[in-house]
Image (cartoon, rainbow, N blue to C red):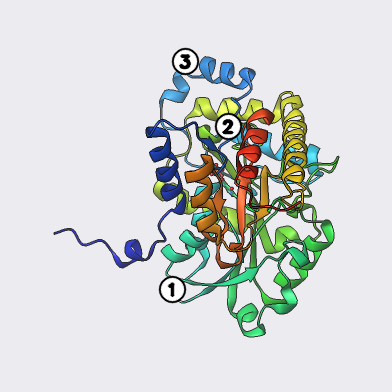
Amino acid sequence: TIEPARRMKELPTQFFARLVGKAAARIAEGHDVINLGQGNPDKPTPPHIVTKLQEAAANPLYHKYPPFSGFAFLKEAVAARYKEDYNVDLDPATEVAILFGGKTGLVEISQCLLNPGDLCLVPDPGYPDYWSGVSLAGAHMTFMPLKADNDFLPDYSRIPAADADKAKLMFINYPNNPTGAVASSSFYEETVRFAERHNIVVSSDFAYGGIGFDGKRPVSFLQTPGAKEVGLEFYTLSKSYNMAGWRVGFALGNAKLISLINLIQDHYYCSLFGGIQEAAALALTGPQDSVHSLSAMYEQRRDALFAALDEIGWKAAKPGGSFFCWLPVPDGYTSESFSDLLIKEANVVLAPGVGFGTHGEGYVRLGLLAEEARLQEAVRRIGALGLFRN
Ligand code: PLP
């Protein structure tokens, strides 16, 4: 008999897998399902990046093992992008690690820093992969509630002092998945002070850094004075460049933390295919108009969606960034019962908020990942259920 290790049994199950299963079952029954429950960009990668990969695939240099921590040109490219976009100086050799998507780094950082029994501060609601890393490290979590009345930012004054003193690592994520909230420089300054006071490493997840609305470019944590002393930022091409399938991410910032991430990566992988690294470098250093037009596209979709929500009487706050809308569920439903109802009665898939933590209860997450007409159709179908009052 095969007996998995305890850490495998303790790993949280991927709740998205269940959601995907429910949607697939409806599709198999022949229904026209509008799936807005996941975070997969619906547009293809810009063609100049694809062409670069096709050319680079023929380069025999890339048919051999790549250098362990990746090619210097890709580290230089991401450092140059941070300089241009955020005026942040990064030494490509010591302050940049190349990852298989941001996801791997977000899990590995916990393994780099946490011993069994250690404590990590995690946002609730939040991206579930933070929990996985903490669980694999055998460490514990204290959840930082993100509430509407505090703009979905953690309130550091409410974290019990004993937890703040014990914590070794914390995660923050703006633009935020799932709430769509954005953070200001003053929040990041407060974060650095909190981290310094309690000696906590900050992991800033900037996966949606490229997607900001209303003329505001999201601020990077690394723009904050002192940020590099206390932490690092995870950055990815998945969302801003429509490259989710390519699995290109980065850890940026504190050199000691970067060396730990590189060390753990050396044991798991031997970096990404060189052709992907070359095309990723072009994404970062080449024309950026597709990135800028992506924000404009999601903003247009957001506004079309909110006009439709308004018509059916569904009141919610607009997101400032990311491509997620965080919508309150009507009275009498939990996030899961409401999400189930929408799948069954409207063939619309939205993610139940409870999948992102207990403070996600009372909300569903809608991804702006379909054309405007489909988003409007989804709202029309939901409106026809007659659950919202004008
Ligand atoms: N962080 C957040 C908040 C995300 O939503 C995602 C992807 O959905 C990631 C990180 C990971 O992105 P990737 O591994 O594709 O870089």
* Circle 3 Cα neighbour tier, 10 Å, few/some/many (<14 / 14–19 / ≥20): few
* x, y percent for residue 45: 60, 25
Which numbered disc, 2 or 1, marks the residue closer to the eye?
Answer: 2
Query: SS class of the residue under badge 1?
Result: loop
Given the image, on which type of amino acid does mark 2 rest? Answer: Met
> 290 and 323: which one is in front?
323
Q: Is residue 336 left or right of residue 26?
A: right
Does label 2 or label 1 sit earlier along the sequence?
A: 1
What is the spatial separation of the Cα atoms under label 1 and label 3, in whole angstroms? 46 Å
Quadrant in the picture for residue 379:
top right
249 versus 167 height, above or below = above
Viewer-proximal residue, 163 or 126?
126
State the CA–CA distance, disc 2 to disc 1.
35 Å
Q: Secondary structure at mark 2?
A: loop
Up-down relation of residue 261 to residue 367 (above or below): below
Disc 1: residue Cβ within 8 A of ligand 1's nearest atom: no
**Amino acid type for the residue under numbered disc 1:** Pro
Label placed on residue 303: none
Disc 1 and disc 3 in contact, CB within 8 angstroms: no
Q: Are marks 2 and 1 in contact (CB under 8 Å)?
A: no
Mark nearer the viewer, 3 or 2? 2
- Residue 100 shows in the view: no
The residue to which callout 3 is attached is 58
**Position of residue 42 in the picture relative to residue 134 (left or right):** right
Quarter where residue 185 is shown? bottom right
Residue of label 2: 243
Residue ID for mark 1: 116
**Callout 3: helix, strand or loop?**
loop
Q: Residue flagged by tag 3: what amino acid is it?
A: Ala
